[in-house]
Image (spheres, rainbow, N blue to C red):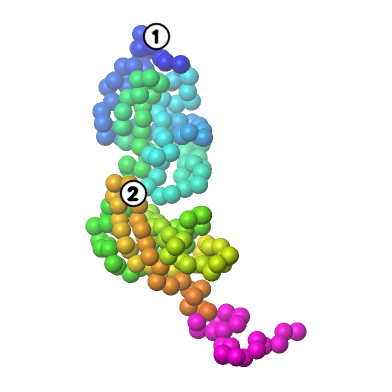
Amino acid sequence: MTLVPDEHPELWDFLSARRLGEVLSGTVAAIERFGVFVALDDGPGHPLFPGVGFVSAAELSWERFESFEEVVRVGQRVSCEFLQFDTYNGEARLSLKAMRPDPLRAFAAHVACGRELRGEVTKLIPFGVFVRVADGVEGLVHIDDLAPAPGAGLQDVVAVGDRMTVVVTDVDLVRRRVRLSPVRTDRQVRGVSGESGSAGRGPGQDPPDTP
């Protein structure tokens, strides 16, 4: 339903007076599957929605998240940057993440391709794993670079929480992607050093007896 300006003059006057980059404060009024509504302190009520302010999923956080509740909760006080007046819905499009520096830009400014880093595996997906290499920055290690044995899956090579040494191969600020190449995982190091169950077995030796 499109709102008619003449029927809601107070709302239209408020939104028309907002400027790009202006900071607006309010309270998270509702969390929906498509975004977050914010009831603004200085704004009028909305005739249809829980709040005049709206934050889409893309504008919530620089960091990857699985659910909106990982970032905000209903009743939470927030300050957001004004992006635009959505004249179709009669709402203020806001950005919560704009209130913080972009961690990927800081990462790109200080870390060159070819740099070796240590990180933690945060998620396994069908085509690779994500590794956190800095606060707010995760990169992808492609499954082809992990080389699981035929018939094996990623879970046989690496697990969430594993520490991994990686090399930065690409940082794409436009598509917001970091590509990594694995050097080794702690799991591999343990296997070589003899901390895994079958380590220490020499060529031609039988495995130790088990009770």
What span is in magenta?
192-211
Q: Classify mark 1: residues with Cα within 10 Å, few (<14), some (14-19) or many (20+).
A: few
Location of residue 181 in the rendering, given as x and y in whole percent from the top left corner: 38, 65
Disc on the earlier residue, 2 or 1: 1
At 48% from the left and 56% from the top, the residue drawn is 127
At mark 2, the secondary structure is loop
Q: Relative to 26, is 153 on the left or the right?
A: right
At 33% from the left and 47% from the top, the residue drawn is 175
Q: Which quadrant of the structure image shows residue 23?
A: top left
The reply to whether residue 38 is in sight is yes
Q: Amino acid at mark 2?
A: Arg
Q: Classify mark 2: residues with Cα within 10 Å, few (<14), some (14-19) or many (20+).
A: few
**Near-viewer residue (73 or 197):** 197
**Near-viewer residue (123 or 97):** 123
Reading the image, the residue beneath label 2 is: 176
Looking at the figure, which quarter contains the C terminus? bottom right
Tell me the number on the disc at residue 7: 1
Label 2 and label 1: CA atoms lie apart by 41 Å
Residue furthest out toward the left: 109
